[in-house]
Image (spheres, grey):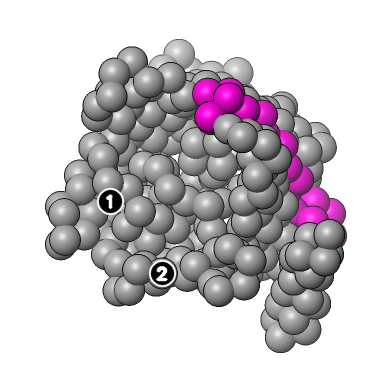
Amino acid sequence: MLKIKNFFLVPVLFLALTFTVFPQSISKTGTTAAKFLSIGIGPRANAMGGAFSAVSNDATAMYWNPAGLGDINEYQGVFNYTKLFADINLSYFGAVIPLGDLGTAGFNISALNFGEMEITTELEPEGIGTTFSASSYAFGISFARHITDKFVIGANVKYIRETIFNSYADGFAVDIGTIFLTPFWGIKFASSISNFGTKMQISGDDLLVRYDQDPTTSGNNETVDAFLATDRFELPLKLQIGLSREFEISDGNNFLLAIDANYPNDNKQWVNVGGEINLFNKLISLRGGYKTLFLADSQEGLTLGFGINYKLQDSFGVRVGYAYQKFKFLDNNHSFGILLTF
């Protein structure tokens, strides 16, 4: 009983310290580009409220904390699909390759699809009969390695591109993370920085306009070709600090508890919490969590989900999962995923 009490004291002290050292700042919501990079990946992590930086131990670690790749010693392939609001959906594909003593490598692709949209004008607000599309992509390469048997570090380097009609913006970013197995009751401590990279600026044919340098003067050239200049926007940089710990309930059954503190550059700070109950040697997993605790005007909240982990052979297994995420005003999100191990 004493050990359990001491363990629950740690998250309390952790939260007090983080919000003292990193006080609430002015919100800069809506001021960054490539915001799709902030959408959580994978039904397991999403069902646990996004509290996953210290848990990351599968192919989705390339998104949450690339250091988690260091504890993967099998080949993995993952595909996740998240249905968002307004016919928007996010797909994610990743593969992990263990390299023995060298470490673990992987690659990943994220794709946000908005579907076809009607082109409207000031004179024809109902549409002109043609459509356009918009999309966002990220292509990443990851690597992680153990520095000691209890400390692992990893990185994910990615190319980002967003398009809308005939315009686009692109950039590069890196995610860096660490995971440390502390000597205190089996607690894992993690830290990660996501989307540290270049600013993004829109360019393309849609910015080409006809320009009259001096409309007050007659006889001058009124059709000079010119490009509109747009601002350069930062990526959604985020620092995460997390803790996780497993509790054995009985033989073959355990409970995983995780907590993450988040410090973004385009919003105020918040905390995610989540848990997972694993039954029958992790054959069935029940998950739940809560997102954006302590964030004023939060639009997110409860998360729920489940997973099934089935070994077809000693060397081949299938994991499927589902996650539900509640939103205050927008449609609730649903995430589906399948992970193959071999």
Which residue matches tag 2? 150
**Measured Cα–Cα span from mark 1 to mark 2:** 26 Å
Residue 40 versus residue 311 in the image, above or below: below
Q: Residue at 35%, 32% (x, y): give it.
A: 78
Q: Residue at 72%, 60% (x, y): give it.
A: 271
Query: Would residue 217 appear left or right of 102 to someone viewing this image?
Result: right
Badge 2 local density, few (<14 within 10 Å), some, or many (20+)? few
Q: Which residues are magenta?
A: 279-298
Residue 43 versus residue 264 in the image, above or below: above
Badge 1 local density, few (<14 within 10 Å), some, or many (20+)? many
Which residue matches tag 1? 140
Q: Residue at 74%, 71% (x, y): give it.
A: 10
Q: Nearer the viewer, residue 30 or 271?
A: 271
Label 1, secondary structure: give it: strand
Q: Amino acid at mark 1?
A: Gly
Coordinates of residue 161 in the picture (x, y in percent): 32, 49
Q: Nearer the viewer, residue 313 or 126?
A: 313
Coordinates of residue 128 in the picture (x, y in percent): 48, 18
- Residue 6 within the segment the image draws in magenta: no
Confirm whether residue 212 shows in the render.
no
Query: Would residue 85 appear left or right of 331 to someone viewing this image?
Result: left
Q: Residue at 45%, 13% (x, y): give it.
A: 129
Coordinates of residue 209 in the picture (x, y in percent): 34, 51
Confirm whether residue 194 shows in the render.
yes
Q: Amino acid at mark 2?
A: Lys
